[in-house]
Image: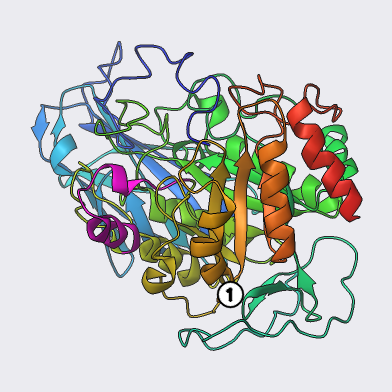
């Protein structure tokens, strides 16, 4: 959804500052020591089997610098992956983080923070010595968390060789009967299938909150996400819950309050994912709000930070987000990845050709003032971790336009991509004629999921039509949203987290129950 409630109303002027990014520069601290010339704090924000997310904060105690280079060594064979807030390099065990052009100035008493993702085996010992422009620094390392146990991998679903695209609808496999609980999902032709070959559909709701509460400084989720609230979703006979996320909160960037970022945020998300799975439903983790200043046509905010929907994901942090998320969840193929909420490069560019090229390949896109990560970049980030989870790839025009999805689709070595579409009564593609002409051809070739559907009428006439069309084509759909908002501005499915529906939500609830 483009404009969830509370999207910007609670942002303060301080939260709107654009003077700092992931590499934040802060003012002098009282009583800063004159010697040594620098102090470094090293911390691990999150750790999983084989990988971790780290950060270094260096304070300049000496003369002001215009250009800096932080050096240290990984003592246990750790290998640097992706980084942000600095230009990261590694030679042998030696690691260097050099300033970007936008944060080269490091005044006396000021600090700068940079983050990274790296791999480890055996031990993840913290570095013991750091230098700033060759001068030794005092050190203070933050706590290293205990590695989070990962689920025992289960057998993977055989997938077709990628890239020849089927020339027509694939026959539905002879089902052996879906098992109970959330399935491991793969792609067979134009169907989602479990490891027994049975066709599956994702039918359920969105649980909004984690994309905006943290960046607004108000919490992590909007309302309860405890077992009772998840059980209420399952009571609607939903089998899927989509969970929108914020990249700055997940990566632990320092414009987010400490209590809502990094490990605290990721642990909260993992807890919700576990509860969704415990109730037999499929979790869909999705990148919703991202970094990058955009003030052009249809801009949601002027803020550089991840405080609204941007036209495309950013190259600075979005690949690192998906590297971290994929490493966190890759051992459990019941979890689905949704690459980016609602791309709208078409509002920034002058032609459809430019919009779709930006969508797939990223880079420098007309009308967008930051470096863009295209859908291919994000697929590559996920697959580089070894994750074989199902990936949903949205279209343009706020995911409402799939007209060139088939010809522009990113490559995937696992063959496990599905198309994602969003449909509301106020969108351009909002009737059966458009669905027949633009959605049906996509659905004939690849699985199609309506990741969001809803209406701002506080009724369900439109979603009834969406569900009827998608049912007739054996497709998947998720209602927006399981939050207690005003159904005419949300729209919202419920008035209470015990599952009491709005008049709009009753249409989805009753339909899901009828299907089961």
**x, y percentage for residue 305?**
36, 31
Identify which residue is drawn at 51% across, 86% down.
Answer: 167
Q: How many numbered markers are drawn?
A: 1
Identify which residue is drawn at 83% across, 46% down.
Answer: 511
* 457 relative position to 131: left or right: right
**x, y percentage for residue 351?**
22, 54
Residue furthest out toward the left: 66
* Residue 133 can be seen in this image: yes
How many neighbours does mark 1 have within 10 angstroms: few (below 14), some (14-19), or many (20 or more)? Answer: some
Q: Tell me where residue 490 sits by quadrant.
A: top right
**x, y percentage for residue 60?**
22, 29
**Magenta stretch encompasses residue 351:** yes
* 505 relative position to 368: left or right: right
Query: On screen, 60 above or below 397?
Result: above
Which residue in the structure is indicated by mark 1? 444
Identify which residue is drawn at 32% across, 26% down.
Answer: 303
Q: Tell me where residue 131 sits by quadrant.
A: top left
Identify which residue is drawn at 40% across, 34% down.
Answer: 306
**In which quadrant of the rendered image does the C terminus lie?**
bottom right
Which contiguous range is marked in magenta?
A: 342-360
Local secondary structure at mark 1: loop
């Amino acid at each position: 959804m483009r404009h969830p409630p509370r999207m910007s109303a609670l942002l303060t002027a301080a939260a709107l500052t654009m003077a700092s990014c992931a590499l934040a520069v802060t003012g002098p601290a009282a009583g800063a020591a004159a010697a040594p010339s620098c102090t470094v704090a090293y911390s691990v924000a999150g750790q999983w089997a084989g990988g971790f997310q780290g950060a270094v904060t260096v304070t300049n105690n000496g003369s002001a610098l215009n250009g800096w280079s932080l050096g240290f060594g990984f003592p246990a064979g750790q290998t640097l992956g992706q980084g942000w807030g600095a230009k990261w390099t590694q030679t042998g065990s030696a690691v260097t983080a050099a300033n970007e052009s936008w944060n080269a100035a490091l005044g006396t008493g000021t600090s700068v923070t940079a983050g990274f993702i790296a791999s480890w085996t055996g031990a993840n010992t913290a570095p013991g010595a750091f230098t700033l422009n060759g001068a030794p620094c005092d050190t203070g390392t933050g706590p290293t968390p205990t590695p989070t146990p990962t689920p025992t991998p289960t057998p993977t679903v055989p997938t077709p060789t990628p890239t020849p695209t089927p020339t027509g609808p694939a026959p539905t496999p002879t089902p052996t009967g879906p098992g109970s609980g959330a399935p491991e999902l793969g792609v067979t032709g134009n169907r989602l299938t479990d490891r027994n070959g049975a066709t599956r559909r994702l039918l359920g709701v969105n649980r909004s909150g984690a994309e905006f509460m943290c960046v607004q400084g108000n919490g992590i989720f909007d309302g309860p996400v405890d077992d009772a609230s998840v059980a209420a979703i399952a009571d609607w006979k939903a089998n899927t819950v989509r969970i929108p996320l914020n990249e700055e909160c997940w990566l632990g960037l320092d414009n987010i309050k400490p209590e809502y970022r990094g490990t605290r945020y990721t642990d909260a998300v993992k807890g919700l994912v576990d509860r969704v799975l415990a109730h037999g439903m499929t979790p869909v983790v999705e990148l919703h709000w991202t970094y990058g200043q955009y003030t052009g046509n249809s801009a949601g905010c002027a803020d550089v930070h991840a405080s609204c929907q941007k036209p495309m994901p950013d190259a600075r942090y979005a690949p690192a987000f998906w590297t971290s998320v994929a490493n966190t969840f890759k051992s459990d193929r019941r979890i689905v990845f949704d690459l980016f909420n609602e791309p709208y490069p078409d509002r920034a560019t002058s032609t459809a050709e430019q919009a779709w090229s930006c969508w797939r390949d990223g880079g420098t896109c007309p009308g967008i003032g930051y470096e863009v990560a295209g859908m291919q970049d994000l697929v590559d980030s996920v697959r580089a971790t070894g994750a074989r989870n199902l990936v949903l790839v949205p279209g343009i025009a706020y995911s409402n336009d799939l007209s060139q999805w088939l010809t522009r689709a990113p490559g995937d070595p696992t063959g496990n991509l599905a198309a994602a579409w969003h449909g509301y009564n106020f969108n351009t593609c909002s009737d059966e004629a458009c669905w027949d002409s633009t959605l049906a051809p996509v659905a004939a070739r690849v699985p199609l999921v309506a990741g969001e559907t809803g209406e701002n009428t506080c009724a369900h006439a439109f979603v009834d039509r969406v569900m009827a069309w998608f049912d007739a084509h054996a497709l998947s759909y998720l209602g927006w949203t399981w939050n207690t908002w005003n159904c005419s501005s949300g729209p919202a499915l419920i008035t209470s987290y015990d599952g009491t529906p709005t008049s709009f939500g009753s249409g989805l609830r009753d339909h899901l129950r009828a299907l089961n």
